[in-house]
Image (cartoon, grey):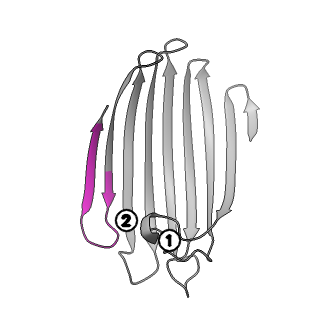
Amino acid sequence: MIKIDDKFTQVLTLGIVEGGTGIDGELFGDLRRHPTSFGHFSNLLEFSPDTSLEIGGSFLAGSSGADLRNNVNAYGLDLTFIHKFDDVRRIKWLSEAYLQHRDDIVAEDEALGYYTLLDVRLTDNYGVGARYDNVERTFTTGEDEAYSLY
């Protein structure tokens, strides 16, 4: 983490995890012996003690099969805006988009997915919010959408 001044901070996270991640190996295959590597870089800008904006980017690399290394990559962008009205009440808007690129014959070459979430905290125990998701399918054509209210 690098803190440039009281209003601007940068954070870099890097890691390597066991392979075979995702539901039934759909993201990077189901072989656990090929590790998945990831990175995330974010910039946090504080406009005031009550208002902040974070912009970040992510990268994931993994393998979809026994003979293939790092043939599946995902690139992401994220944005988080938070405004606090007081110690309890706040509004948070979070959006994230990912582009998956595959270098194999099993699935589509590229697929895009994104979501946006609005969360309003009203009291310590109560909040309301909404979320929208849109994901292109990788193993079949088309896309899936989801709406959530809480």
Q: Residues within 10 Å of mark 2 (few under 14, many from 20)?
A: some
Q: Is residue 143 above or below residue 81?
A: below
The numbered disc on residue 28 is 1
Check disc 1 and give the amino acid type. Answer: Phe
Q: Earlier in the sequence, mark 1 or mark 2?
A: 1
Q: Which residues are magenta?
A: 134-148
Residue at image x 61%, y 31%? 45
Q: Nearer the viewer, residue 76 or 119?
A: 119
**Residue 129 quadrant:** top left
Query: Quarter holding the C terminus?
Result: top left
* Element type at mark 2: strand
Check disc 2 and give the amino acid type. Answer: Ala
| Residue identifier under label 2 | 111
Q: Position of residue 84 (x, y in %)?
A: 51, 18
- Residue 26 visible within the image: no
Q: Is residue 139 above or below residue 148?
A: below
